[in-house]
Amino acid sequence: MPTLVVDIGHRGEIYRTAADAARKNRQCQGKLEGEAAVLERLLSRRFGPLDEATQNRFRGAGLEQLERWTDRILDAPTLTAVFEGH
């Protein structure tokens, strides 16, 4: 019988086993990396090559922030405007 592990994870989810928690952690990490890759691709396409400081800025961000910046690409007239208010 597996050991019961109660862990409050991302967004308040409860996991029954350590394996469930680890699997969800990998999924969240994958989603975060995917969102960062999309943001990088769209920013590069819209505003040209990105400097290292810009790349580091979104690579260290959380999922909600990445999603917010990705949404702003549609309306932002400049690269700076994408990141304003952060």
Image (cartoon, rainbow, N blue to C red):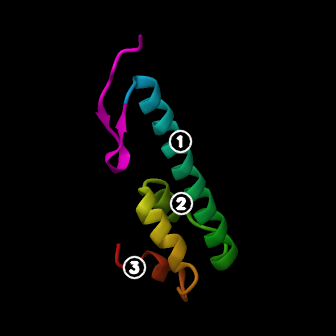
Looking at the picture, tell me which residue is in the foreground, 77 or 75: 75
* Residue with the mark numbered 1: 27
- Neighbour tally class for label 1: few under 14, some 14-19, many 20 plus, Cα within 10 Å: few
Identify residue type, mark 2: Gln
Identify residue type, mark 1: Gln
- Neighbour tally class for label 2: few under 14, some 14-19, many 20 plus, Cα within 10 Å: some
In the image, which is nearer the foreground, mark 2 or mark 3? 3
Residue 5 falls inside the magenta stretch: yes
Q: Earlier in the sequence, mark 2 or mark 3?
A: 2
Spatial CA distance of label 3 from label 1 is 29 Å
Identify residue type, mark 3: Glu
Where residue 35 sits: x, y (%)? 56, 58
User: What are the residue bounds of the magenta stretch?
Assistant: 1-15
In the image, which is nearer the foreground, mark 3 or mark 1? 1
Look at 42% across and 62% down and name the residue there. Answer: 64
Relative height, residue 20 to residue 47 (above, below): above
Relative height, residue 40 to residue 16 (above, below): below
Where residue 63 sits: x, y (%)? 45, 57
Where residue 56 sits: x, y (%)? 48, 57
Look at 46% across and 24% down and name the residue there. Answer: 19
Spatial CA distance of label 2 from label 3 is 15 Å
The label on residue 52 is none
The label on residue 55 is 2
Relative height, residue 53 to residue 19 (above, below): below
Q: Residue furthest top?
A: 1
* Residue with the mark numbered 3: 84
Residue 13, by quadrant, is: top left
Element class at badge 2: helix
Looking at the picture, tell me which residue is in the foreground, 65 or 41: 65
Quadrant for the N terminus, please: top left
Element class at badge 3: loop
